[in-house]
Image: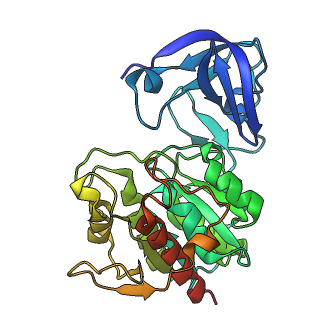
Amino acid sequence: MPVTLRRGAVTAIAERHDGLVRLEVDGRPCVAYPELTGPVALGDEVLVNVQALELGLGTGGFDVLYANLTRGLDLPPEEGAHVMKLPYTPLQHAVVHAEERAPEDAAGDVSGTPVVCCSLHSQVAPACAGLGRELAVAYVQLPGGSLPVPLSDAVRTLLHEGYVRTTVAVGPCLGGEVACVSPASALLECARAGMDAVVCAIGPGVVGTGSRFGHGGLAAADAANAASALGGSPVLAARVSDADARDRHRGLSHHTLAVLELIREPVTIAWPDGLGLPEGLREVEVVDASDWREACSGLPLSHMGRGPDDDPWFFAASFAAGALARTLVR
């Protein structure tokens, strides 16, 4: 399992965001996470991981800064942190987790809290639009896609526009406003912070193999099971498409069917009115999602390179999940 590293120099800085810098190293696109590797500037000598770009991965069209040899050495650990992210890997680093800060008896009460469970990151923006800006909504990122929360332009927009109040990075995910060890702890932390609803999803770029259970979308089952066990109200965002060229994702995706197989307690599936129901689908709540386009105006909507005009039912179904969750807020 070799890591493909290359030495280079920073030749351009394209964008700076909280927790993320888009840059070029020797003219190649690259991203850096300053909280991991320290600040970055033009001319810095760096090591970059070039493997994803050289393999031509669909979601890995850039290099990732691995170490800044100019100004990123001897960085101090986060004060008071004891739990490691990415433990026993070359990028292990200590982060203060919510479970360390608050004693267990101070955890929030998840009872009745709606939890939207997404199998893809591209469902997050329309689901949050369905919930609306009036509610206090937390975004919880689970492993199954990219790990850094700051990589998501969609989450950045949702935070800026007021659809999301806070972000939580679970397990190996990193860069959230809060870190939690497990999905269950994340939901308890969201409740303790007074969130009205929670949207759980993986980061951009789902891990996929084409197999029944070999994909990152199963994180939706983890979220639903944790929500049910803690007394919350999980709502599953169905992955549907009438534009995907792959049979396994046409209509109701096999990702959603696999998630349903692994959920231990009944979960409500939001379904947009006007789309034919698949046979045998139970626990379905049909939702009027006719205003999804207007509600999602201004938000970044993209799924596998397709926008709302290319694959409308995908976004309508995700919006329906948020709209249904909104009706469950106490």
**Image vertical order of residue 242 relative to residue 172, above or below:** below
Q: Nearer the viewer, residue 111 or 238?
A: 238
Horizontal arrangement in the rendering, residue 327 relative to residue 10 (left or right): left
> How was this image coloured?
rainbow
**Point 46% across, 24% down: residue:** 53
In the depicted view, which residue is nearer to us: 124 or 190? 124
What's the residue at 72%, 28% (across, down)? 14
Residue at 62%, 53% in the rendered image: 154
Q: In this view, does 23 lie above or below 137?
A: above
Q: Nearer the viewer, residue 8 or 67?
A: 8
Which quadrant of the view contains residue 20?
top right
Mark count? 0
Residue 265, picture quadrant: bottom left
Residue 150 pos. (x, y %): 65, 45
Q: Nearer the viewer, residue 49 or 100?
A: 49
Query: Which residue does the image show at 72% across and 32% down from the upper left?
Result: 34
Quadrant of the rendering where the C terminus is positioned: bottom right
Give residue 147's position: percent from left, percent from top: 53, 44
Q: Is residue 187 visible?
A: no
Q: Quadrant location of residue 244?
A: bottom left
- Compared to residue 270, the image places residue 92 above or below, namely above
Q: How far across and how far down the image is residue 39, in percent?
A: 78, 26
Q: Residue 71, percent across and down?
A: 77, 17
Would residue 14 be seen by someone viewing this image from the given angle?
A: yes
Q: Quadrant of the N terminus?
A: top left
